[in-house]
Image (cartoon, helix red, strand yellow):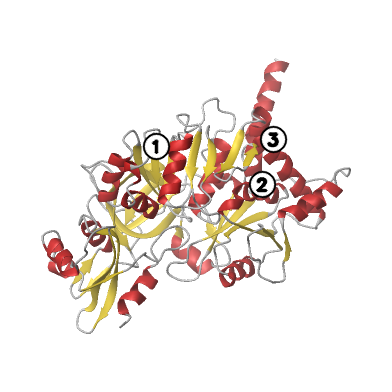
Amino acid sequence: MRGATFGESAKDSERAVGRTVHGLLELRSAVQPDRTAISTDDGQQLTFARWQAAATAAATALVRRGIRPGDRIGLLFGLRDWPEFAVHYCAVTRAGAVAVPISDRQPAEAVGYVLDHCGAAGLIAGPSASAPAGPWWTADPARLAAEAAELADQALQLPEVSADSLAQVLYTSGTTGRPKGVLATHGNVVHGTRPTAKHRPLTHSEEFLHSFAVGTNAGQTMLINALDAHPAALVATRFTPGRFARLIQQRSVGSVFVVPAMAAELLNAGVHTRFDLSSVRLLGSTAAALPPTVATALGTAFPNATVVNYYTSTEAAPAQTAMIYDPDRPTALGLAARGSVMVAGPDGRPLPPGETGDVHLRSPGAQRAYYRDAEASAAVFRTGWVRMGDVGYLDEDGYLHLVDRESDVIKSGAFKVSTLQVEAAALEHPAVAEVAVVGLPHPVLGMSVGAAVVPAPGTAFDPAELRAFLAARLAAHEIPARIVTLDVLPRNEGGKPLKRAVRERLTDPA
């Protein structure tokens, strides 16, 4: 009986450790110390043992610096610095502090705003980052490593961290205003992981490939995948279609994660005609709805892959819907894969199937919240549900369909126009590679429909021809009154079109 009691106690201890981000690392490094956790296309490699040792050493240096539990620490890193970012994320949480990931592609003003807003005590910046000045201290990984080496003979007590402790403040993309800081506990971030499982997620792969910036919700998902899934994370340090596809071919990558903008670039570049993509078994798209024409084309370009569209947000994670693309349900985003999904009316009560309303997701773990913004928190986080800011409906089988972002719906006269529907129809035209649709001021209707189009390579794009094409697919009030062509769509760090910038281009008389 003593042996049984001890065994149960050991399992309980493992479970407790695995309920923190750095605890996942501790458990993984104990059983697979020499296994590669993260690698980059420029030759960097990080094993679980090195990740654990470096994170613990850096955590000790942070505590020696005076970092206390709950202090916010900015992590300013680029795609080339993913291994260092992963090390210092776990170092910050092991020191009991709160990680604030920031991409080094962000302008200095935006970085300064985030650090000031979260009240950062310090900033750890990668070698290519330009760190803004402020009341926080700034250090690079090499400096922290040197400080840790000086403490090698000293025993500093690291604080206890629980599932209820704050792990991160992740800032939203800010497409409709100033970015908001979203608080998440360790229990929320690691929800759904199985740290002691024999069979880990993505077992069909030895590497999963992505090119997501730190500081995005997609990037944080990749960090947890690196800790919990079977394959190693392979980071493309610069995304171009050819470079990305070449990596798939050279490394026989089994799982690939993209945002719709990346998917469109891969297809428009015709990489499937130049590279062997047959190794891919899972192609996951996240951050925005995958247009039906793009999803269909991905199925052809990646002949052995299951194409899955994931729907969530920084606020709602880890709740999400997932959908294996089904041509019989081309606009569906799927069923709830984690947590619950609801479409509600203005009173917050569920609507019956087919009725359009506000989309909500319920997290299966501890709910997130906005940092230092009680008013916005009250509007978005409601008794366990997260209001997504999207308009949609559930069909009779419970599948979620999006109509549009609430802020993007165009009210033109007596009609409401879905920009997603117009974009999906425009993408069916062979001369349209990418498109973003926005509302434009109109003296009579209030708003009219405008579109910015990136023409497909090697085609002669004609706006009048596109309008004629759309006339067979859309109502008259949905056809863009103004169309401009762009070389590229302005996008944020997460790959979403910046509709404010698109609107400025469309209203510019030049």
**Label 2, label 3: how far apart the Cα atoms are:** 11 Å
On residue 504, which mark appears?
none
**Label 1, label 2: how far apart the Cα atoms are:** 27 Å
- The residue positioned 50% from the left and 61% from the top of the image is 172
The residue under label 1 is which amino acid type?
Answer: Leu
Circle 1 — which element? strand
Circle 2 — which element? helix
Q: Does residue 26 sit above or below 369 in this rendering?
A: above
The residue under label 2 is which amino acid type?
Answer: Val
Give residue 76's position: percent from left, percent from top: 62, 59
- The residue positioned 71% from the left and 22% from the top of the image is 6
Query: Which residue is at the front of the view, 437 or 381?
Result: 437
Q: Does residue 162 sit above or below 203 in this rendering?
A: below
Q: Quadrant of the C terminus?
A: bottom left
Q: Quadrant of the N terminus?
A: top right
Disc 1 and disc 2 in contact, CB within 8 angstroms: no
Disc 2 and disc 3 in contact, CB within 8 angstroms: no
Disc 3 and disc 1 in contact, CB within 8 angstroms: no
On residue 282, which mark appears?
1
* Among numbered discs 3 and 1, the one appearing first in the sequence: 3
- Label 3 sits on residue: 49
| 10 Å crowding of disc 2: few (<14), some (14-19), many (20+) | many
Query: Which residue is at the front of the view, 433 or 119?
Result: 433
Q: Does residue 507 sit above or below 372 in this rendering?
A: below
- Label 2 sits on residue: 87
**Label 3, label 1: how far apart the Cα atoms are:** 28 Å
Query: Which residue is at the front of the view, 432 or 423?
Result: 432
